Amino acid sequence: MLRTLPDESTGVHRGAPRHRREGSARERRRFRSRPPAAPPGPRSGAAATLPRLLATGGYRGSWLRWDLFAGVAVACYVIPQAVAYAATAGLPAATGLGTAIVALLVYAALGVSRVASVGPESTLTPLIGATVAPMAHGDPARAVALAATLSLVVAGWCMVARLARLSSLADLISWPVRVGYLAGAAILMIVGQLGTVTGTPTAVEGVASRLRSFVAGAGATRAAPLAVAVGTLLLLLLLDALAPRLPGALIALTAATVACAVTGAAGHGVALLGPVRWSPPSPHLPAVSGQDVQLLLLVGLGVAGMAYGNTVMITTGAGRRSGAPDDVDLRQELVALAGVHAVLGLTGGFPVAASNSRTATAAAARARSQVHSLVTAGIVAAMLLLEAPLLAQLPKAATAALVVFAAGRLVSWREFGRLARFRRAEMLLAVATTVGTVCLGMIVGVTAAIALSFVQIAQRLARPQHGVIARRPGRHGHHRVNDHPDAQPIPGLIIYRFDAPLFFANAHDLVRGVLRAVDEQAARASVGWVVLNVEASGEIDITAADCLQALCLALRRRGVVLALARVKPGPMSLLDRAGLTRLIGEHLIFATLPQAEDAYLTNRLRPVPSGPAA
């Protein structure tokens, strides 16, 4: 028998009959456009720290053309963005490009997403600049050293989170806080570029001082840099609207560079980027003091949380957009970010995160693996080593326009409207985050907003929904009596549901609610049992246990029996330790509500012995 081999392009055997090999043109197109199979799920143990490429069993030759194409496409975005975002952080252009190279290489070795592109990101650079600039006092070398130290601090926090198993910590930053922070960061980014756009000097620190100095010098605005910035911005907007798949940033900055070179705009006040000197870095510790490290610890925690949260959201969403979702291992993402920032700290780079635009580009180009990041890093390195004179002719006003364009994409008025329609408190939290970020500074503003979100969580947990439930005719399950007037409680039986974990902040409210329901029912008819449905209480503390004991004794004084239903194993063990199962009686703790109802109906004509007295 002729042995056949599978054909990668058609998915059938070469030795198969012709009519089976060819198939229809539609089938062949569907197979070729099919996204690559999703990589294996999260790994554990020693395998969790292996590079993704090695752990999945090697690289397939058929992937190379897709990774090459994706790498070139991403490079068209990362080069102008790295230059512009480095300017936002107050760092040299060479630092931005070098940071991009290192981040791409290290994440390719340690990352778990096949399409994520990690590097300088617009959501982080305003925070880096707001932190580093005041400490550097205008010294570029010190600014680079402080940014590298901040990268080491971020690496440390990521490893602490990994060792403490806090991979879900980024989920504590609510969506309104994220929306408000991005809007505030956009305002700070735009304000920081006003002087570059108009060609006038502005203050270095503080939004208010920058705006005052900008207004004071508005009369000295130079037409040439303003024209370059406005023209670049209009071209970016036009390309984004008409041809979003093209590398608009690269096209716009190239056009601005050519236009300035042809018209001689440098002689009319248009500042150029200047010489870009970069050489492959040698590992070294940044020259900073211990006091500098102490000042950067809190900022590093905030940067680590934002970088991790941003990376997780982008890496988990990119696969869904490409049709082949990655199983993102959150623990390994912390290890990857720690490794990336550790190397960045030793090579003079600043903190990074996954980029939404570049990751989307890689996904759209059907990148098969992180080899596309290696291709991108190689192209950026070649640009730095071979084409540095071209970068030197780049007008700063054009990079400022790119920063303004990126800032505009951070603000989502639609999200503010959606939050307002959903709940006014959510929208107010987003607005408070924006105002706090702009007026108080990024760290203080975001910290205050996160504190407000925790206050909201505490309020909702302290005063959750709870009340009497009963069956409705023709419906399954039990429903709140206050919401459904047709609900029919069993005479003499009150089933009370508490929709939250039971702890010190809400336990007293539960006791008050149950006693109020008993008193209201006793005014109309006698009450024999109260069945407390605690299925939502996956946790209980000592205060809640004491309150349940007080509730049991208070009901006994009224001649009412307390029973529990749907108690989970964790709370049950805690009830045992607190002596509540003995007090209430194990025969009055039921697995389901129907069992509790049947027990009440069986025993309502004769008293049910309660547990021993306290």
Image (cartoon, rainbow, N blue to C red):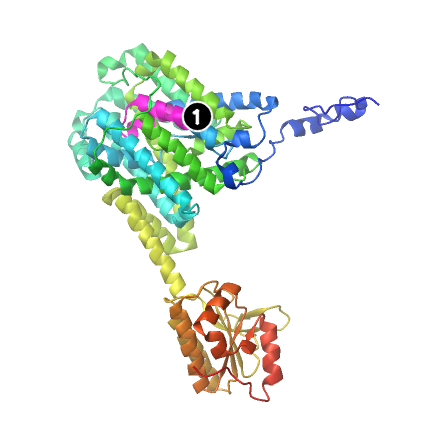
Above or below: residue 119 compared with residue 511: above
Q: Is residue 569 left or right of residue 190?
A: right
Q: In which quarter of the image is the N terminus?
A: top right
Given residues 365 and 605, the one toward you in this image is 605
Does the magenta portion include 535? no
Quarter holding residue 613: bottom left
Q: Residue at x 57, y 80 (%)?
A: 490
Q: Quadrant of the C terminus?
A: bottom left
Given residues 595 and 485, the one toward you in this image is 595
Where residue 306 sits in the image (x, y, percent)? Answer: 37, 41
Q: Which residue is drawn at 52% across and 32% down?
A: 52
Does the magenta portion include 84? yes
Quarter holding residue 162: top left
Q: What element carries label 1?
A: helix
**Chain part drawn in magenta:** 80-104
Task: Report if residue 554 is visible in the image.
Answer: yes
Q: In this view, does 215 lie to the left or right of 50?
A: left
Q: Name the residue at the left extreme.
A: 216
The kind of residue tagged 1 is: Leu
Above or below: residue 236 compared with residue 40: above
Where residue 155 sits in the image (x, y, percent)? Answer: 36, 36
Q: Name the residue at the bottom extreme.
A: 606
Given residues 602 and 44, the one toward you in this image is 44
Where residue 87 sits in the image (x, y, percent)? Answer: 29, 27
Residue with the mark numbered 1? 105
Main structural element of the magenta stretch: helix, strand or loop? helix
